[in-house]
Amino acid sequence: MSADRPINADMPSTEELEPASEEKPAAPASAAEPAKTAAADTAPMPPAASKPPQPSKPTRPPKPRRRPKPLTPKLLALLVIVAIGFIVAAILGGTGGGKDESGAAPEAPPSGAQPGAAGGGGASELGFPGFATNNTTRVGGADPAANAAAVALAVYPSTTASQRPRSVTLVDQGNWAGAIAAAVLMAAPARAPILLTDGGAQPAATEEALTALDPKQTNELSSGAAAAAAAEAADLRDQLLPKPPAHIVIAPENAPEFAMPAAAWAARSGDPVLFAGGDDLPAPTVAYLEKHKQAPIYLLGPASVLSSELLREADEIGGAATRVAAEDPVANAVAFARFSEDGFGWNINDPGHGFVLVREDAPLNAAAAAPLSASGTWGPLLLTDSAGTLPAEVRDYFLDVKPGYTDNPTRAFYNHVWVIGDQEAIDVTQQAEVNELAELEKIGGG
């Protein structure tokens, strides 16, 4: 793009889009005169005698609008699924959380409210999308299948062939461990997002996404025990990715809330995720470790969910084994986001990054969101344990990495947070707090 060529140089001018008129009207007119908006119905009319009648003048008929691209209806249908119920009037008054003069936060809109509908709140009136703030974007589908479809289309808009993935991975929504392990197939060069099925059937959101994405290949994982499903995904990873794994992650099969952050890292790094529980490594996990004896092993979770016996056994079978952990799921995710050793771990301890926020009781949403950690603002998965309150560990972490500037905000680093789930999972009050914590702030004098 030429530096002296405006970015909107190819857009038609307003003269081309609207009929010519010799004189502007006294008040703004609707784009389509017969269909008046609610605002037009309530606007005060000028007095009848305030202006003499004007003779009617012949006008040119407006030019027909350009047809939307064929995929637009499908994308809009999915975005409606995502946006329903998320009119975030409470967070559009700035980064301070949008309180009224009394100091009370305004109520969130009722679930299911449509933009512009009665009771839908003020977000549509302000022109803001109902699922985003300046530092956060919500993917708020009605279920994990809708969230997975929305994430896949956010990463691959699919309006042209070059924007489509070569392959996608289908995982049954009853197979949470397989879905987390399948996130490794989002790593380069496979770059396959996850879509969810339901007992062999495809939910409507999955069908819409598959139609739009139009992949050349579909990877489908069979359901089964956690260790077997993960080993199957790891073997498929070895077929599709050109290099052996640099590291291997072992996650707890009986505590999905501790395993969830592994999905984001697998998508980012190409490191496979295996599962274990009890005091002995499952046979599928052992078999994969024996094939890659040189790869260092990282256990994700405390001894209460991955025992010291498992750590010793993994260390004896494969490469050196190390534990990355904290005592509760929320702190465990923060510890993993901060961790770094010999090329393993996010090492996110400074501003200028993306993050993904998911409820700790929604492992399928962690898998669905994994492509966001391997594209865009590439960032770790963090957990919240309630709908309304951001955990103190996450708040402190966001404060530690809060972006700031001294003189020029346009040259600063910025944080962005994807919020995954509907308002029942993470409500707008918590999203508003996250938005404030992610806001760029002036520091120092001047």
Image (cartoon, helix red, strand yellow):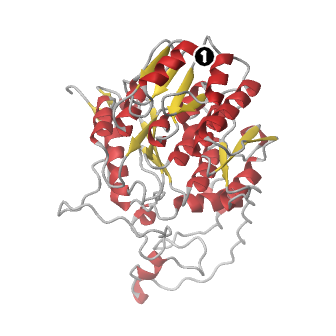
List x then y, in percent, for residue 352. 42, 28
Which residue is located at x 59 percent, y 58 percent? 79
- Disc 1 element: loop
List x then y, in percent, for residue 23. 54, 70
Q: Nearer the viewer, residue 240 or 77?
A: 240
Outermost residue toward the front in this view: 279
Q: Nearer the viewer, residue 58 or 384?
A: 384
**Looking at the image, how many numbered discs can be counted on the residues?**
1
Which residue is located at x 53 percent, y 27 percent? 280
Outermost residue toward the right in this view: 216
Q: Is residue 47 visible?
A: yes
- Quadrant in which the N terminus is drawn: top right
Residue type, label 1: Ala
Q: Residues within 10 Å of mark 1 (few under 14, many from 20)?
A: some
Q: Nearer the viewer, residue 329 or 1?
A: 329
Outermost residue toward the left in this view: 102
List x then y, in percent, for residue 177. 58, 41
Task: Name the side, left or right, on which 320 lies relative to 210.
Answer: left
Task: Name the side, left or right, on which 195 lies relative to 46.
Answer: right
Which residue is located at x 40 percent, y 59 percent? 88
- Quadrant in which the C terminus is drawn: top left
List x then y, in percent, for residue 155. 62, 41
Task: Name the side, left or right, on which 207 lies relative to 31.
Answer: right
**Image quarter of residue 118:** bottom left
Q: Image height check: is 89 above or below 176?
A: below
Q: State the residue position of label 1.
A: 246
Which residue is located at x 55 percent, y 35 percent? 263
